[in-house]
Image: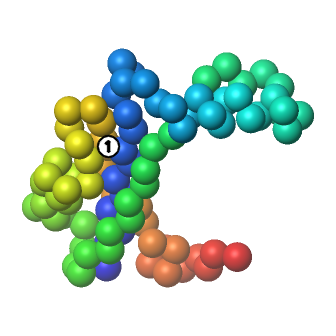
Amino acid sequence: MARYVVDVMPKPEILDPQGKAVLGALPRLGFAGVTDVRQGKRFELELDGEPSDEALAEVTKMAETLLSNPVIEDFEVHVEVLAEAAGKHKA
């Protein structure tokens, strides 16, 4: 089994009101030095089988057609090694 991760972010030229709201709240909560915040989305898709170029292309197509709005968002797709496959356990 392979996990494909799609990170979606607003394009740099698109206003990000949620990011601006977080940026405004951080100093009020005592966090200093943050100069910008952009808020995005993360999708984790687990597919049967080993990672492959074909599966990566399929997940990219999913990101283009459903998971993102290509007019206002950019996305990146990558494969994540599952902890079980690596012999590790999450705490």
User: Where, by quadrant of the figure, is residue 27 drawn?
Assistant: top right
Side of 19 relative to 71 (left or right): right
Q: Is residue 20 above or below residue 9?
A: above
Q: Nearer the viewer, residue 74 or 27?
A: 27
Percent from the top left, x then y, of residue 70?
Answer: 20, 38
Image quadrant containing the N terminus: bottom left
Q: Residue at x 22, y 52 (%)?
A: 63
The residue beneath circle 1 is: 76
Image quadrant containing the C terminus: bottom right
SS assignment at label 1: strand
Q: Residue at x 30, y 41 (%)?
A: 75
Q: Give the class, few, some or many, for how many residues have Cα within 10 Å of label 1's Cα (few <14, many ≥20).
A: few
Q: Residue at x 32, y 74 (%)?
A: 46
Q: Is residue 2 above or below residue 48?
A: above
Q: Is residue 9 above or below residue 49?
A: above
**In the rendered image, is residue 56 in sight?**
no
Q: Is residue 53 above or below residue 84?
A: above
Q: Nearer the viewer, residue 83 or 4?
A: 4
Side of 60 relative to 45 (left or right): left
Percent from the top left, x then y, of residue 81?
Answer: 42, 66
**Residue type of the residue flagged with mark 1:** Glu
Q: Residue at x 25, y 67 (%)?
A: 51
**In the rendered image, is residue 82 in sight?**
yes
Q: Nearer the viewer, residue 9 or 60?
A: 9
